[in-house]
């Protein structure tokens, strides 16, 4: 028996599972994931990595073959790396190292390069969403977990033991009681509806087509392009096999629901760009609207909203899919700790707090990008010349990191704290720059220089926290935000949870108290 199987067995034995089926009894899952899109699948992958085996149901009868969300941001590539999944994504995807903004006649307005982003992966990895989902499903299957296609959730109701969920599989009705439900079923989420929640916000003006096709228009290697003109814009994002994900605004008078033919879509692209794009091999095209929306509550303690069930952002920002994967990573480590009895149930309250902060940040960034594009389109009217101010180099790098989701912060979360001096640099709540070098599923306390009380911390938290000597592991103190020494606690998701400057008895006692707010110690000390 593997360590994973043993861990899963211990968890199942400690949980009070029960189920009720209409007509017959069936075993209940401990965690039910509703939806097998990227958020649901990655949540399952991460739960398994942390020792919890969920059940995944999907109302679709089979996987889809649509491009949808494509570009994985550097911050998410680091998360995939920590989850042991980076290699299949790098093999399957193409790399985008810079973005060109072009005006009428394909004149360059500005070009944004990712080389100075300051992370392990200074590029976006682009592949169609159906391939992302296939990679995640294949990983789950290798671990013995199958997605249950053709299984629709009819209702989710409160139950003394958790959540009572009614499932319909080809006319066969089943009722199960799940300890927790992860709602990853998209914008029309039944999990969100069962919480009496809705996606608050707004829908952007206009209607759009999204397509997966080939074009003859020359483009520099590893480059995405956004072309603006007086009548709108076209976004070309590279995909494997010389294909492109294409976004284009529709004419205001175009209200039809049926998709355009290849000739019609090609003519629209030519009109928007002012050149012969040479569209061919149209594989998929779909109408869509752009939204800026987020649920007011992301959780009620038993139900958690992930991905499009929780938030919708403009695809021009390229952050919706990535935020969904971050949602999955955040809830997985917290839920696993609670289910193992290693953390207090109150830890789960931090999901709504932290992902709420991040989701609003995503909406702000996506809205900024959306506004920039629409502003450039407006500049093109009346033979105007669109332009973007050069800006300060440091500000430009900060803006690039912002768009690559490298500045996501949980500052203000109850899981974040510090003691001692307050310095600049990576702060509690921010991503630890060298997080890709840390392995395993636990917390890491990285100590720079001498520190007292380490034996006490080991005795209290040995099964929860790995203590790392920074000099032996060659971590850089300045990069960690403790240039003159100290200690930082890196959470299982790669974010800094606590910073102690210096690492003395007072700050180490504060760290110990911080851990005790949400973790259950190995050894309970008295007095």
Image (tube, grey):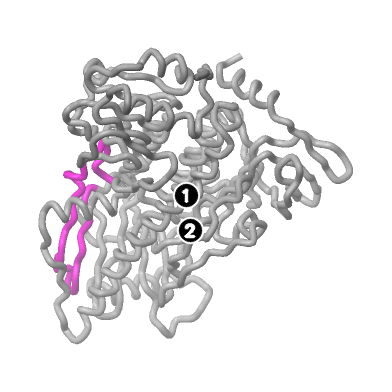
Residue 402 point in image, percent of width and height = 27, 52
Is residue 320 something one can see in this rendering? yes
Query: Who is closer to the viewer here, 161 or 240?
Result: 161
Question: Which quadrant would the N terminus be assigned to in this image?
Answer: top right
Q: How many marks?
A: 2
Residue 290 point in image, percent of width and height = 43, 68
Residue 470 location, quadrant: top left
The mark closer to the camera, 2 or 1, is: 1
396 relative to 487 in the view: left or right:
left
Residue 19 location, quadrant: top right
Query: Who is closer to the viewer here, 305 or 470?
Result: 470
Identify the element where label 2 is drawn.
strand
Q: Which residue is mark 1?
A: 353
Which comes before the other along the chain, label 2 or label 1? 2
Looking at the picture, does residue 273 appear above or below residue 124? below
> Which mark, residue 311?
2
Query: Who is closer to the viewer here, 193 or 461?
Result: 461
How many residues crowd mark 1 within 10 Å: few (<14), some (14–19), many (20+)? some
Q: Residue at x 53, y 48 (%)?
A: 37
Query: Who is closer to the viewer here, 148 or 35?
Result: 35
Label 2 and label 1: CA atoms lie apart by 14 Å
Q: Is residue 98 magenta?
A: yes
Looking at the picture, does residue 333 appear above or below residue 36? above
Q: Residue at x 45, y 27 (%)?
A: 441
Q: Residue at x 32, y 19 (%)?
A: 468
Looking at the picture, does residue 374 appear above or below residue 86? below
Q: Is residue 270 magenta?
A: no
Q: Looking at this rendering, what residue extends furthest in the front direction?
A: 527
Residue 97 point in image, percent of width and height = 22, 47
445 relative to 450 in the view: left or right:
right
Q: Which residues are magenta?
A: 97-123
């Amino acid at each position: 028996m593997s360590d994973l199987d043993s861990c899963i067995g211990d968890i199942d034995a400690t949980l009070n599972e029960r189920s009720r089926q209409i007509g017959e009894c069936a075993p209940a899952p401990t965690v039910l994931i509703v939806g097998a899109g990227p958020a649901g699948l990655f949540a399952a992958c991460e739960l398994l990595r942390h020792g919890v085996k969920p059940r995944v149901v999907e109302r679709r009868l089979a996987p889809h073959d649509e491009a949808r969300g494509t570009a994985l941001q550097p911050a998410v590539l680091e998360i995939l790396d920590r989850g042991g999944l980076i290699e299949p994504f790098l093999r399957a995807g193409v790399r985008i190292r810079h973005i060109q903004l072009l005006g009428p006649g394909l004149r360059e307005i500005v070009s944004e390069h990712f080389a100075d982003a300051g992370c392990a992966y200074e590029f976006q990895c682009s592949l169609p969403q159906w391939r992302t989902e296939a990679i995640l499903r294949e990983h789950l299957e290798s671990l013995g977990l199958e997605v249950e296609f053709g299984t629709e959730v009819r209702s989710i109701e409160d139950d003394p033991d958790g959540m009572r969920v009614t499932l319909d599989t080809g006319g066969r009705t089943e009722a199960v009681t799940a300890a927790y439900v992860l709602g990853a079923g998209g914008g029309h989420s039944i999990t969100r509806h069962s919480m009496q929640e809705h996606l608050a916000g707004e829908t952007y003006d206009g209607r759009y087509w999204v397509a997966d096709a080939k074009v003859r228009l020359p483009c520099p290697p590893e480059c995405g392009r956004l072309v603006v003109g007086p009548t709108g814009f076209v976004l070309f994002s590279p995909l494997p096999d010389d294909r492109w994900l294409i976004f284009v605004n529709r004419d205001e008078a175009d209200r039809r629901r049926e998709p355009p033919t290849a000739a019609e879509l090609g003519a629209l692209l030519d009109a928007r760009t002012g050149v012969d794009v040479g569209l061919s091999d149209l594989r998929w095209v779909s109408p869509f609207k752009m939204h800026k929306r987020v649920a007011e509550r992301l959780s009620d303690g038993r139900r958690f909203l992930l991905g499009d069930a929780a938030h919708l952002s403009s695809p021009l920002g390229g952050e919706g899919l990535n935020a969904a994967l971050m949602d999955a990573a955040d809830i997985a480590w917290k839920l696993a700790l609670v289910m193992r009895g290693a953390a207090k149930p109150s830890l789960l309250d931090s999901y709504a707090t932290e992902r709420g902060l991040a989701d609003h940040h995503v909406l702000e960034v996506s809205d900024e990008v959306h506004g920039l594009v629409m502003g450039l389109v407006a500049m093109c009217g009346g033979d105007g010349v669109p332009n973007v101010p050069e800006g300060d180099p440091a500000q430009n790098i900060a803006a690039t990191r912002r768009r690559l989701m490298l500045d996501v912060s949980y500052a203000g979360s109850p899981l974040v704290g510090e003691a001692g001096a307050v310095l600049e640099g990576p702060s509690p709540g921010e991503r630890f720059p060298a997080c890709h070098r840390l392995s395993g599923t636990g917390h890491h306390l990285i100590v720079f220089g001498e520190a007292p009380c380490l034996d006490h911390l080991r005795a209290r938290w040995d099964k929860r926290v790995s203590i790392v000597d920074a000099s032996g592991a060659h971590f850089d103190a300045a990069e960690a935000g403790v240039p003159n020494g100290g200690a930082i606690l890196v959470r299982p998701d790669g974010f800094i949870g606590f910073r102690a400057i210096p690492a003395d008895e007072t700050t180490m006692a504060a760290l110990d108290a911080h851990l005790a707010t949400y973790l259950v110690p190995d050894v309970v000390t008295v007095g």
